[in-house]
Each structure stands twice: as C-alpha cells, then as structure tokens.
C-alpha cells in the first residue's frame, strides 16, 4: 500500500498528542507544527539544557500543556500519559549527543533505553492510544563505513554509548510491539533520521550551533572531523515523515508498524568541511580551523537508504542542503535582530508545506 506524504492538517485537528522531549530542538519545532494544525499537545521532558533555547524563545509553554519531568521516572510518566489520554505519542526524549555519551554513559543508557521501556510500558496502560512513533537515529546501525545507505533491515549496533543505546531502544521497541502492543491494536514504529539541522539549535558538540557561536564571536570555528560525511537535512524534513507515519499508524497499525528511514537525497550527503565552507560563503568574514585536540571516536561515513519511505509512505525530501543552510543563517540573523521567533518558525513551516505540495504535484 502506497500513501501520499502530504501532511494532512485535517487529520491532526483535535488529535491529542503526547510528546516526550518537547523542550528540545526537534520537539519544539514539532510542538509548533502540531499546534498550527489544531492538535492538542501535552509535552513531557526536562528543562532545556542550554540557556538560550528554542523552547523558551518561541514560547512553547504557551501552546502546549508542559510537564517538566524525567523520562526515567516511570510513575510520573505513566500518570502524565494516563491523565492526558492521548491518541498518539511521539517519543523524542533522549540524551542525544555522541560526545556527551562518552562523558556520561550510564545516564545515556538509562535515558535512551530504560526511558524507552518506561514509555512503552506506560503505553500499555493507555486505552485511548492508537499509535506510537519512537524517534531514534541513523546512528543505530552497525556502522561498517559503507558507501551505500543503510536499510531498515540492516543490523543494529553502535560503537559509542549513544549509538549503542539507540540501537537498544530500537530492539526494546520491537519487543514491546510484538509482545504487547500489536495485540492491543496499537501501531508502533521507529523513525531513524539523518543529521538534523535548522534554526533554533544551540546544543553543544553539534556542527551548526558550534559554527554559529564562532561566527557571532568573530572567531574561527574549530572543527573536529572535517572529512566526516553525514546525511544532513532540515529539521522539517524528518518531522514531516514522522507526521505522515503517525497518521498511517493510526489508520492502519498492521500495515506500518515497522522501522523507517528519513534522510536526504544522496547528493546532499556531504562532508563537514563542505558544510563549513558553504556556511562561510553565507557569513562574510567567517573562517574555520581544524581541531588539534584528541577526540573520541565518531564514524566517518554514514548514509541512509530512504527508498522504503518513498515507496510506501510517498515521502521524499523537499528542501536542498544549499537552501537549508540559507534558511538556517537567515533564521539565526532574525533571532539576533530580536524578531518574534515563533512567527519565523510558523513562516518556515508554511513555506515548507507549500513547497512539499509543489514537490509532489
């Protein structure tokens, strides 16, 4: 069965959506998009990690019912879900950084593995629930540095604690789906996105935030792995995939309860130094230098095969990497100038949705 990936705003009107990790970069963007379509959203997550963050500057707590709490606290999580009685759950709460996973491995496993188990255990207790989308990562695969993209059927793995924990989260999800949630007719899928970039990300150890911080301070950006190649994509690209997938899970849980890749076209799988040089062209006077320090291991090459999402969800990328980088620089300059950033986010979502429709027609 093949469906269209056009975002069906009518479907989301009045839908009750429970979103873990709503205080994060991707969670904040998804909160805005869901609210824009008329969904009723309850968020569950920790306080934002960075002082400057999209959750705060876009006033996300004004548009969602926000529960500031820890995914590792099962009793609080379960109570929050049952009180809300959601139709759909998006699970984004995570320790999301490779570098941090080397610094705090136990916290990473507790959050990403036990946190997922807590979420799915609570889902078993929720009679209103129809669909769960667990957002993991492209790094969940056993990375052999292949030049071709990983398919959803390739084995899980991960050398660093973050990647390994996300592979474990995938396995936990598959176990709960087969053991419990399939029998309850609840659609359960995992979504593996590439390296997500966009306006509003201030996280440490991420390329685009590191670049923009350096540019603002008129300093050279210090780059760890200039030759590393990643599947870069604007944050709205995978979010559109998650929304399409959740709708199909809701309507046909048996047909879509699997794992799904959401990434860019092959020509937008680019090296870090390509990104760096392109960003410099958009920000006069900027520069970069290689990091001379020893750094923990990170994979050098990673690509996703997105043919399954294209074939069965009708999903494909909308914005090119060149255009994405321009949007990021423009977004950041609007923030520096003190513009209302929720308005800017809504403008980008509307522009993306229009371009998505034109791409499909």
Image (tube, helix red, strand yellow):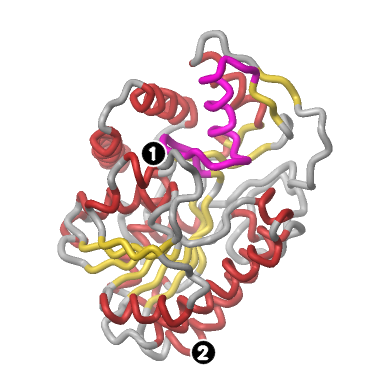
Q: Is residue 42 magenta?
A: no
Q: Is residue 216 magenta?
A: yes
Q: Where, quadrant-wise, is the N terminus in this rendering?
A: bottom left
- Where residue 216 sits in the image (x, y, percent)? 51, 20
Residue 155 in view here: no
Residue 148 in view here: yes
Q: Are marks 1 and 2 in contact (CB under 8 Å)?
A: no
- Name the N-terminal-most of marks 1 and 2: 2
Query: Which mark is drawn over residue 318?
Result: 1
Does 341 sit above or below residue 329? Answer: below
Taking the spot 69% from the left edge, 29% from the top edge, the residue there is: 223
Magenta range is 196-220
Which residue matches tag 2? 179
155 sits to left or right of 353: right
Image quadrant in which you'd find residue 218: top right
Query: Which mark is drawn over residue 57?
Result: none
Does 241 sit above or below residue 187? Answer: above
- Which secondary structure lies at badge 2? helix
Q: Nearer the viewer, residue 61 or 5?
A: 61
Taking the spot 45% from the left edge, 51% from the top edge, the residue there is: 48
C-alpha separation, residue under disc 1 versus residue under disc 2: 37 Å
Q: Residues within 10 Å of mark 2 (few under 14, many from 20)?
A: few
Taking the spot 38% from the left edge, 65% from the top edge, the residue there is: 44
- Where residue 121 sits in the image (x, y, percent)? 46, 84
Number of the front mark, 1 or 2: 2
- Where residue 131 sits in the image (x, y, percent)? 35, 74
- Which secondary structure lies at badge 1? loop
- Where residue 219 sits in the image (x, y, percent)? 62, 17
5 sits to left or right of 192: left
Q: Where, quadrant-wise, is the C terminus in this rendering?
A: top left
Does 356 sit above or below residue 133? Answer: above
């Amino acid at each position: 069965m093949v469906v269209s990936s056009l975002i069906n705003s009518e479907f989301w009107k009045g839908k009750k959506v429970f979103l873990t990790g709503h205080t994060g970069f991707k969670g904040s963007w998804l909160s805005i998009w869901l609210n824009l379509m008329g969904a009723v959203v309850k968020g569950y997550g920790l306080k934002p990690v960075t002082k400057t963050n999209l959750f705060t500057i876009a006033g996300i707590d004004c548009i969602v019912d926000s529960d500031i709490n820890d995914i590792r606290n099962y009793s609080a999580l379960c109570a929050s879900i049952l009180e809300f009685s959601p139709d759909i759950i998006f699970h984004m709460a995570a320790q999301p950084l490779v570098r941090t996973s080397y610094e705090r491995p136990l916290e990473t496993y507790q959050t990403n593995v036990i946190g997922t188990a807590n979420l799915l255990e609570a889902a078993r207790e929720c009679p209103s629930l129809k669909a769960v989308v667990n957002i993991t990562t492209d790094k969940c695969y056993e990375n052999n540095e292949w030049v071709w993209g990983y398919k959803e059927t390739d084995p899980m793995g991960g050398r660093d604690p973050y990647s390994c924990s996300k592979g474990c989260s995938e396995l936990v999800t598959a176990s709960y789906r087969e053991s419990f949630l399939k029998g309850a007719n609840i659609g359960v899928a995992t979504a593996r996105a590439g390296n997500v970039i966009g306006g509003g990300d201030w996280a440490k150890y991420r390329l685009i935030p590191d670049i923009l911080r350096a540019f603002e301070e008129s300093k050279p950006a210090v780059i760890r792995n200039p030759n590393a190649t990643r599947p870069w994509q604007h944050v709205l690209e995978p979010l559109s995939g998650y929304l399409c997938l959740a709708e199909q899970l809701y309507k046909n849980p048996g047909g879509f309860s699997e794992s799904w890749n959401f990434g860019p076209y092959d020509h937008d799988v680019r090296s870090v130094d390509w990104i760096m040089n392109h960003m410099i062209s958009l920000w006069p006077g900027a520069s970069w230098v290689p990091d001379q320090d020893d750094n923990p291991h990170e994979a050098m090459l990673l690509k996703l095969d997105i043919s399954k999402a294209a074939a069965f969800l009708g999903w494909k990328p909308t914005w090119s990497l060149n255009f994405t980088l321009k949007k990021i620089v423009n977004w950041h300059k609007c923030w520096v100038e003190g513009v209302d950033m929720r308005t800017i986010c809504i403008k980008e979502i509307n522009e993306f949705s229009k371009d998505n429709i034109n791409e499909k027609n």
